[in-house]
Amino acid sequence: MTLVLDAGALIAYEHGERTVRAFLERASRTGVDVRTTTGAVAQVWRNGAHQTRLTLLLQGLLAVELTGERARHVGTLLGRANRRDVVDGSLIDAATDGDEILTTDPDDITALARNSGKNLIVTRV
């Protein structure tokens, strides 16, 4: 299992939200990998000098890139789910069966997860 963070979860962590911190602490204790996507990072990154928490968090997780092949998978998924948010789609593409996605947008993430054919846990933060 991997813990996948959407842009909202990254922002929540930056703002000191305890729920996200608790999930990350549990992941660290249990050896669970944490990832996001480069698109989610782009959505939240404004000025690293003022985003100390986010900067430190990003050093310890994998940011999956949106390659050409992934972009085609994401586009296909968005079409099946009748959604438009490429970053949300990239999160689902980066996830594998059994992963848990922390999100502030569970409706769109759940719709994409359902259409992905993957068994994912979607958790609102």
Image (tube, grey):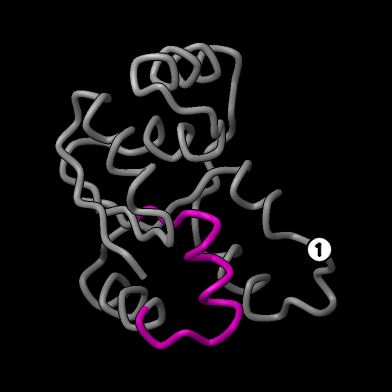
Asked whether residue 17 is drawn in magenta, I would say: yes
Q: Main secondary structure of the magenta part?
A: helix
Residue located 59% across and 21% down the image = 67
In the rendered image, residue 84, in percent from the top left (x then y), is placed at 53, 28
Q: Residue at x 42, y 12 (%)?
A: 76
Toward the viewer: 107 or 26? 107
Q: Is label 1 in a helix, a strand or a loop?
A: loop
Percent coordinates x, y for residue 29 in the rendering: 25, 78
Residue beneath label 1, please? Answer: 46
Q: Is residue 58 above or below residue 53?
A: above
**Left or right: where does residue 69 sit relative to residue 112?**
right
Q: Number of callouts in the render? A: 1
**Badge 1 density bin: few <14, some 14–19, many ≥20, Cα 10 Å:** few
Residues shaded magenta: 4-19
**Residue placed most toward the observer, 59 or 86:** 86
Q: Is residue 68 above or below residue 4?
A: above
Quadrant including the C terminus: bottom left
Is 33 on the left or on the right of 44, as rendered?
A: left
Instruction: Decide: is 5 above or below 82.
Output: below
Q: Amino acid at mark 1?
A: Arg
Front-most of residues 24 and 102: 102
Residue pictured at 28% horizontal, 43% vertical: 110
Q: Position of residue 33 (x, y in %)?
A: 34, 57
Q: Is residue 87 above or below residue 4?
A: above
Q: Does residue 86 show up magenta in the picture?
A: no
**Which residue is drawn at the image coordinates 23% and 48% (left, top)?**
99
Can you give x and y, in whole percent of width and height, for residue 78 in the image?
A: 44, 22
